Amino acid sequence: MVSFLYQNRIQTVISHEPYDVKWLNASMSYDLAFTRPVLQFEKKWGSAENGSSSFWMVQAGTSTPVAGGLWMVSGSYFKNQSRRKADA
């Protein structure tokens, strides 16, 4: 599954600066009968004028049936690419 969101506003209510943000999210999963791996990628491009953050993130995980339940494992990596890295 892939989704893309684009927001563009001429002015925000608070800062009266241009607002331009793009989101990309892609994920995939496959059932291998004994386990179900999942991979997700997310990228956000933010406008430097409004201080919006830019980042990318990748997450991988799996769920495996074990003894009547599910054993789930996942890991992720997050990279902040903002020009303003305060509070990041």
Image: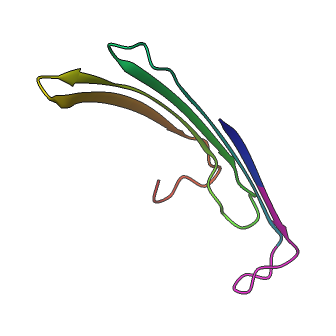
Residue in view at x 62 percent, y 48 percent: 82
Query: Which of these two is toward me, 47 or 39?
Result: 39
Give coordinates of residue 56: x percent, y percent.
Answer: 59, 38
Single out the residue that lies furthest toward the bottom.
Answer: 13
Query: Which of these two is toward me, 85 or 53?
Result: 53
Q: Is residue 45 left or right of residue 33?
A: right
Q: Is residue 70 left or right of residue 79?
A: left
Q: Is residue 63 left or right of residue 82?
A: left
In the rendered view of the protein, which quadrant contains the N terminus?
top right
Say above or below: 3 vs 48.
Answer: above
Q: Where is residue 32, by image quadrant?
A: top left
Residue in view at x 76 percent, y 80 percent: 12
Residue 15 belongs to the span the image colors magenta: yes
Q: Which region is colored magenta?
A: 6-17
Single out the residue that lies furthest toward the left.
Answer: 67
Query: Which of these two is toward me, 75 or 86?
Result: 75
Give coordinates of residue 52: x percent, y percent.
Answer: 65, 61
Say above or below: 23 vs 49.
Answer: above
Q: Where is residue 62, by image quadrant?
A: top left
Say above or below: 43 vs 53.
Answer: above
Single out the residue that lies furthest toward the right.
Answer: 10
Residue 8 belongs to the span the image colors magenta: yes
Residue in view at x 38 percent, y 26 percent: 61
Residue in view at x 45 percent, y 19 percent: 31
Principal secondary structure, stretch drawn in magenta: loop
Give coordinates of residue 29: x percent, y percent.
Answer: 51, 26
Give coordinates of residue 43: x percent, y percent.
Answer: 64, 41
Say above or below: 30 vs 40.
Answer: above
